[in-house]
Amino acid sequence: MDSPDTPRPTPVSALVTSAAESGALMEAELREIFPKLPSFEWIVRGSETEGSIARIEPGMDFNTLAGMVEHHAPVFVRHLAPVQRVIPLMATEEDLTALRDAALEIGEQLDSAAVFSVQTRIVGEGQLPYRKVTVNETLSALLEAQTGAVMECRTPEQVVSVLCTPTRGYMGVSRTERNRSAWPGGKHRFRHEEGQVSRSEFKLLEAMNVFGMALPERGIALDMGAAPGGWTRVLRAHGLQVTAVDPADLDPRLREDRGIRHVRERLQDYLPHSRQRFHVIVNDMKMDARASVELMLRASRLLESGGLAVMTLKLPRAERPPHQLLALVRADLQRLTDAYTILEARHLYHNRHEVTVALTSCN
Ligand SMILES: C[S@@+](CC[C@H](N)C(=O)[O-])C[C@H]1O[C@@H](n2cnc3c(N)ncnc32)[C@H](O)[C@@H]1O
């Protein structure tokens, strides 16, 4: 038990971020996790660039809050960040001075032995006379000089999260693993690669990165609904042989690759006669989620023990109340547990109308 002298961690508010269109789903999930949430204030909803961001105040310190969120594993909460300072802004150059002053105050919380990054988001960039990069550079230099901690924006161990609107700035420090994503607001960027076949490649790369999935270095993968072949290309780049099942054509650049076997069939026709065993199964089929789950269950007998699987669950297009949509997603996830253990299910930055699920074989 804490002694009376042990300082209690201070309750803070937090910024929660979802994809632009998933604000209501994120809110519903958070209200389940924190039934007595006294305050849920939208800062921006449906922004093409920043998504939907709200400020919540569940009356606890950030580590407890983040631990509870992690424990409940919400699908639509993409990013979390603490708010330890709220800074009045005026959308003038003077804001940079106010942000610097606030950074000097919260800089005391930085661990000098751990690398850090300043991650700035600006709502309505263009309306403010400064850019994210200016804020990042200004505050990083200041904090490096003040704390001795080294700035490392690729793999920071701790993050100073900054959100600027035309009237207010929000700032807080946290360990990166508490934020649900190492990227500002969960906007996980990849560079376009030479030879890239489709933008879908980013979905698989993001899943592997955010879920910390290490694909085996050798083995065979089944790509369900593979065309034009983006995921197949990613799996090949990881050294796996790929059986790519899709009635549609693969990109011509993949045709010469002898590590790819293209089976021009629908999965419904392929699965009953396949005897091949796979170390990895991926499924990005454009198909109603329930039907796709059923095919995934049928494919499970082909997955080696301890094998990994990744699938996208397409969300229904028709408008539905958030609780109904959450119930649908949860029913699909529940059904998958007949044959798999669910590692993670998240609406990732590169998902559009879908959720990515990481699975492993039950046996
Ligand atoms: C979104 S694309 C897949 C993109 C792919 N992951 C990539 O990175 O290039 C969906 C694919 O699912 C395939 N598909 C839909 N129904 C299918 C079925 N029953 N069997 C096999 N493939 C199917 C479509 O032909 C389409 O090529």
Image: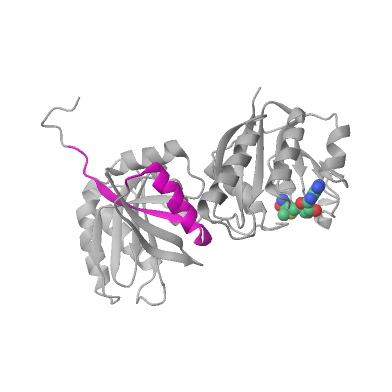
Q: Quadrant of the C terminus?
A: top right
User: Quick check: 310 left or right of 39?
Assistant: right
Q: Residue at x 54, y 55 (%)?
A: 349
Q: Quadrant of residue 139?
A: bottom left
Horizontal and vertical percent position of residue 353: 62, 56
Q: Does residue 227 appear in this view?
A: no
Residue 273, given in percent of the width and then of the height, sits at: 89, 33
Q: Is residue 212 left or right of residue 65?
A: right
Q: Quadrant of the N terminus?
A: top left
Which segment did they paint magenta? 8-36
Q: Is residue 58 above or below residue 167?
A: above
Residue 302 or 41: which is nearer the viewer? 41
Which residue occupies the foreground of this view, 31 or 324? Answer: 324
Of residues 126 and 341, the one drawn nearer to the viewer in this rendering:
341
Residue 94 lies in what quarter of the image?
bottom left
Tell me which residue sits at (45%, 50%) in the image.
28
Q: Is residue 78 left or right of residue 223?
A: left
| Residue 258 belongs to the span the image colors magenta | no
Q: Residue at x 18, y 28 (%)?
A: 2
Q: Residue 71: x percent and y percent?
A: 43, 36
| Residue at the image position 62 percent from the left and 51 percent from the top | 203
Would you say residue 75 is visible in this rendering? yes
Q: Is residue 244 left or right of residue 146?
A: right
Which corner quadrant of the image does residue 208 belong to? top right
The total of numbered circles placed on residues is 0
